Amino acid sequence: MWVIVHTYVGLAIASLVHRPFWQVAVLVIVSHVLLDLVPHWDYTRTAHALAWGWLDFLGALATLIVLLLTGYPWAIVLMGPISGAPDFDVLFFVIGKERGRKWFPSHWDAFPHGRCGKAAGMTVQLAIMGASLAIVVIAH
Ligand SMILES: [Zn+2]
């Protein structure tokens, strides 16, 4: 799933779950695995993977900057990048470094990674982002 989707879900979880920082961090990492099971469309095997990757990364980064500038607690905002961080090994795969050496379980070839067509996969991801954003906004 896209980094920005993981970021939004991490922010939503952190907005709802008022537990110690490390417990929330574990939850958002677990959410990464669960989200990668959901059928979605990934850009990693497309001709313009790097361009999609930049769009994905900059969108997530812009969201985090806006939240910080509008006064969101850093402990909540930090859960966005923690949630998306496992996708760094996908980034290294896409740019050709350490080819085939993905370390995060939901990125292993044997993992039942959810996949579907572009239209349906993007719709699913936008719906998850929208629901997550609503939670973030309502929770604060
Ligand atoms: Zn992932």
Image: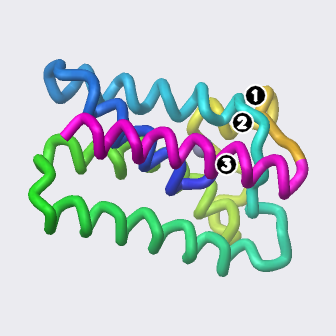
Residue contact at pointers 3 and 2, CB within 8 angstroms: no
94 with respect to 70 (left or right): right
With respect to residue 136, does 44 lie above or below? Answer: below
Per the image, the residue denoted by label 2 is 108
Q: How many labels does the image show?
A: 3
Q: Which amino acid does label 2 sit on?
A: Trp
Q: What residue type is labelled 1?
A: Phe
Query: How would you classify the magenta stretch by its main secondary structure?
Result: helix
Query: Ligand 1: which quarter?
Result: top right
The residue sitting at 11% across, 47% down in the picture is 73
Check residue 137 for magenta coloring.
yes
- Range of residues picked out in magenta: 117-140
- Nearer mark to the viewer, of 1 and 3: 1
The residue sitting at 21% across, 42% down in the picture is 76
44 with respect to 120 (left or right): left
Q: Which of marks 3 and 2 is nearer the N terminus?
A: 3
In the rendered image, residue 117, in percent from the top left (x then y), is placed at 89, 51
Residue contact at pointers 2 and 1, CB within 8 angstroms: yes
Cα separation, mark 3 vs mark 2, equals: 8 Å
The residue sitting at 49% across, 28% down in the picture is 31
Per the image, the residue denoted by label 3 is 101
Q: What residue type is labelled 3?
A: Arg
Cα separation, mark 1 vs mark 3, equals: 14 Å
The residue sitting at 24% across, 35% down in the picture is 139
In the rendered image, residue 25, in percent from the top left (x then y), is placed at 30, 30
Q: Is mark 1 within 8 Å of ligand 1?
A: no
Per the image, the residue denoted by label 1 is 111
In the rendered image, residue 87, in percent from the top left (x then y), is placed at 54, 51
Cα separation, mark 2 vs mark 1, equals: 5 Å
Q: Report the front residue among 69 and 26.
A: 69
- Nearer mark to the viewer, of 3 and 2: 2
Mark 1 secondary-structure assignment: loop
